[in-house]
Image (cartoon, rainbow, N blue to C red):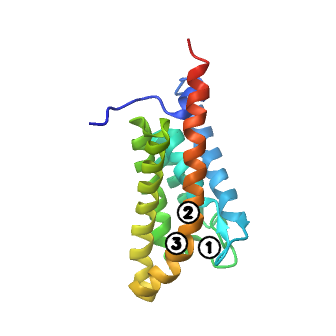
Amino acid sequence: MLQARRLVLIDALLDKDNSLFKTIFLILAGSLLLTLSAKIQVPFYPVPMTLQTLVVLLIGASFGWRMGSATVLAYLAQGAMGLPVFAGTPEKGLGLLYMAGPTGGYLVGFALAAGLTGWLAERGLDRSVIGTAIAMIAGNLVIYVFGLAWLANFVGFEKAVTFGLIPFLFGDLIKIMLATASLPVIWKFLNRDRP
């Protein structure tokens, strides 16, 4: 059975002071990082890739389930208020109208995936390569399930899989490999410096 570990990466990197100021600062910094990850497109075949899912999952793993979910919810709230934080905004619309569009399910999946990944990280899965891979795959699956279910309402299930899943699998595999290669190494480095 997975044992709860209270220490997540952000606690190991910074002091364990859980002041309200520090928490709000980290949530806002994380939501800004999410915005940047949505705007940066990496040329990729067959569709350009953003780093959004990678950042969502790393925020969850680094912040834990509570603060990771709160960070993504703050990002979604900023978007709901009409700020151009999402991929393709403002060109594809803003605010709740954008969120109710075809990609809205993926946005909901982001919050739940950050929570799940954070919960798994709190139980130590981000300390090993296999554990990190499991946490990242689980988070990606949550994003896909909610994203495809919502997208299917617009284009049908078959087209949702064809256009909302298959083109992103290889890019997401690379992002999972990046997270899997980095998180355990960071933990090893941090643990080496401890008495």
Q: Where, quadrant-wise, is the C terminus in this rendering?
A: top right
Residue plotted at (43% across, 39% down): 125
Q: Nearer the viewer, residue 146 or 81?
A: 146
Using the numbered discs, state the Cα–Cα distance from disc 1 to disc 3 in whole angstroms.
8 Å
Most foreground residue, 81 or 154:
154
Q: Which residue is mark 2?
A: 172
Residue type of the residue flagged with mark 1: Leu
Residue 142 is at least partly visible in this image: yes
Element under disc 2: helix
Query: Left or right: 118 with respect to 76?
Result: left
Tag nearer the camera, 2 or 3:
2
Residues at marks 2 and 3 touching, judged by CB atoms closer than 8 Å: no
Q: Nearer the viewer, residue 147 or 191?
A: 191
Q: CA distance from mark 2 to mark 3?
A: 22 Å
Where, quadrant-wise, is the N terminus in this rendering?
top left
Q: Is residue 101 visible?
A: no
Query: Which residue, given by chain and number where applicable, does mark 3 sit on?
Result: 99
Name the amino acid, label 3.
Answer: Met
Give the mark nearer the N terminus: 2 vs 1. 1
Outermost residue to the left = 1
